[in-house]
Amino acid sequence: MLELQEVVKVYLRENFRHEVLKGISFQVSQGEFFCILGPSGCGKTTLLRMIGGYEKVSGGRILLQGEEITGPGPDRIMVFQTFDQLFAWQTVRGNVEYPLKINGMARGERRERADFYIEMVGLKGYENYYPHQLSGGMKQRAALARALALQPQILLLDEPFASLDAQNREILQEELLRIWNSLKPTVIFVTHAVDEAIILADRILVMTEDGDIKMIVENKLQRPRRPGMPGFARMWDFLYEQVRSSRWQAEKRKN
Ligand SMILES: Nc1ncnc2c1ncn2[C@@H]1O[C@H](COP(=O)(O)OP(=O)(O)OP(=O)(O)O)[C@@H](O)[C@H]1O
């Protein structure tokens, strides 16, 4: 469904060419839960933004259903880590309805659709709350409802639970998996947390510190996955070592 072919991203910094991504190629299937795991600064967000069409590639191609991505579209929606992605002056319902309104959906239909997804993310009863009246977890639920309401082909999630406390993070991971099981969207989920990648993903792409693919690992652990289950710790050790060693190699190169 999604194919990246030798994708390169270069930024210019004070007249220096900074190659952030070094020729990334992979494919994601329809309905797959795909995680991109890597240390801070390795280019995960840049990669996601290019798939979203918010950022141009410097080389290579990104194809969605065989068509090259040239800009943003309602078929790919992004959810971010920050709690301030909602419109502060709109209620939860207003936030979820807004993109539908922009897309020309009639009032009755968009109200119905918004309420459906608000209930799905567990915010029924909070439709008329403003963002400042919500906890961090509730804000992320609202952002997820807004994204889901557009019924995108691909959900692009950029560390959406990273700012939550551990307990809320766990709850939201479970909820996301429940929603993914019922709607089966294709999900590309960026994280730097090894446990999160193992709990969520069908496959895990491990990036090197310097913007390359270290490996793509198939996650065959049975769902639901819990840190104490057989095989979890072994996988965690393996992935953690991959992330750690790529960071160490990059540090050695810098010195
Ligand atoms: N607009 C930009 N201009 C110049 N450099 C940029 C720009 N955006 C990102 N970068 C650089 O690209 C590299 C990768 O950044 P990116 O945000 O994609 O990493 P990341 O893996 O998502 O990091 P984190 O986990 O900390 O969010 C960094 O060195 C960053 O400074």
Image: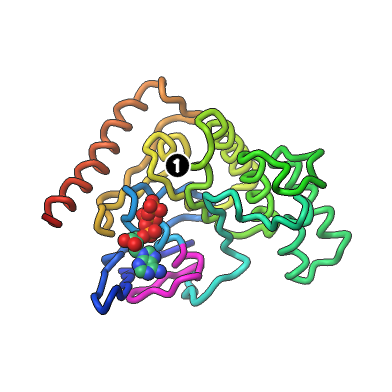
**Magenta segment includes 62:** yes
Q: Residue furthest bottom?
A: 15
The percent position of residue 209, horizontal first and vertical second, equals 26, 53
Residue 45 position (above or below residue 102): above
Residue drawn at 84 percent across, 59 percent down: 109
**Magenta span:** 49-64
16 or 173: nearer the eye?
A: 16
Q: Quadrant of ligand 1?
A: bottom left
Judge the density around disc 1: few (<14), some (14-19), many (≥20) Cα neighbours within 10 Å.
many
Tell me which amino acid carries mark 1. Answer: Ala
Q: Which residue is mark 1?
A: 201
Whether residue 4 is visible:
no
Query: Is 171 situated left or right of 114 in this image?
Result: left
Residue drawn at 55 percent across, 58 percent down: 78
239 or 123: nearer the eye?
A: 123
Query: Is 144 situated left or right of 127 in this image?
Result: left
Asked where in the image residue 98 lies, by quadrant, the reply is bottom right
Q: Residue furthest right?
A: 108
The percent position of residue 199, horizontal first and vertical second, equals 45, 34
The percent position of residue 237, horizontal first and vertical second, equals 27, 31
**Magenta segment includes 156:** no
73 or 160: nearer the eye?
A: 160
The percent position of residue 207, horizontal first and vertical second, equals 30, 52
Asked where in the image residue 88 lies, by quadrant, the reply is bottom right
Residue drawn at 56 percent across, 54 percent down: 79
Residue drawn at 50 percent across, 30 percent down: 166
| Element assignment for label 1 | loop
Whether residue 254 is visible:
yes
Image quadrant holding the C terminus, namely bottom left
Colouring scheme, one of rainbow, by chain, secondary structure, one colour: rainbow
